[in-house]
Image (cartoon, rainbow, N blue to C red):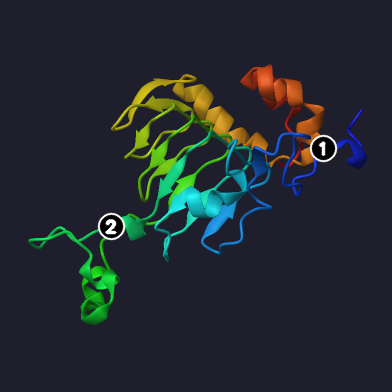
Amino acid sequence: MSATPATLPDPTVLHPMPGQERVVLLKPLITSELIEVGEFSYYDDPDAATEFETRNVLYHYGPEKLRIGRFCAFGTGVRFLMNGANHRMDGASTFPFPIMGGSWAEHFDLITGLPSRGDTVVGHDVWFGNGVTVMPGVTVGHGAVVATGTVLTEDVPPYAIVGGNPSRVIRHRFDPPVVDRLVELAWWDWPLETITEHLRSIMAGSVEELERVRPAGA
């Protein structure tokens, strides 16, 4: 029997775990137009979970965006460094003199229009361990796992496990044909009622099970 609306979790609740204010859903928390987050992606921090926009997304002056998919899990201290952290390196000094004000501000054109790697993108169902640092313009594929303390400098393939500084692929969670099938299934886009009904298959079943319960049209 399908779940009734009354039994479905609410993606608009800031703290989904009663008594655990260290866990916040990001979608109802985010106010910046430069950050997009899918439903049920969460951040866990015992000290400043609700300050994710200012403490965890740094140098975000635009126009590059941070795009995060649905059902992502972020451990304490995850940091996204955006393109505003960039400095000139073609001259004798990398110091951003114009931001100090005074007459130096007349040369602000020297720190605008620096090379950009574009948006930073995290796919669906991605798990970040504690203390991960993401460099500007990195794309993390669906289903990836990023180990604690990793410095992500390059794109991450779907369903890869990465770690280290700089980051490297440690192994892949599934063989390439299975990864292709999982990405094509895109269970994260299924109706919430279907996800709820088949939660055990999503969490512990095979790709064949998911293909059998895939809703029509999905």
- Residue at the spot 39% in from the left edge and 39% down from the top edge: 133
Q: Would residue 95 be visible to someone looking at this image? A: yes
Measured along the vertical axis of the image, is residue 12 above or below residue 72? below
Quickly name the residue at label 2. Answer: 86
Instruction: Specify the amino acid type for callout 2.
Output: Asn
Query: Which of the numbered marks, if any, corresponds to residue 193?
Result: 1
* Nearest to the observer: residue 181 or residue 153: 153
- Circle 1: residue type: Glu
Give coordinates of residue 127: x percent, y percent.
Answer: 53, 31
**Residue at 75%, 33% in the rendered image:** 195
- Dot in front, 2 or 1: 2
Left or right: residue 142 compared with residue 116? right
Q: Nearer the viewer, residue 93 or 124?
A: 93
The answer to whether residue 57 is above or below residue 34 is: above
Q: Helix or strand or loop: what does disc 2 sit on? A: loop
What is the quadrant of the C terminus in the image?
A: top right
Asked where in the image residue 167 lies, by quadrant, the reply is top left
Quadrant of image for the N terminus:
top right
Q: Quadrant of residue 190?
A: top right
Please determine whether, in this image, residue 78 is positioned above or below residue 52.
above
Q: Which one is earlier in the sequence, the residue at label 2 or at label 1?
A: 2
What is the quadrant of residue 215 in the picture? top right
| Residue 33 in the image, given as x and y percentages of width and height | 56, 64
Q: How far from the left and from the top, in percent, is residue 55?
A: 49, 50
Residue furthest left as drawn: 92
- Are the two marked residues, 2 and 1, in contact with CB atoms closer than 8 angstroms? no
Q: Residues within 10 Å of mark 1 (few under 14, many from 20)?
A: some
Left or right of 58? Residue 143 is right
Left or right of residue 195: residue 107: left
On screen, residue 96 versus residue 169, left or right, reads: left
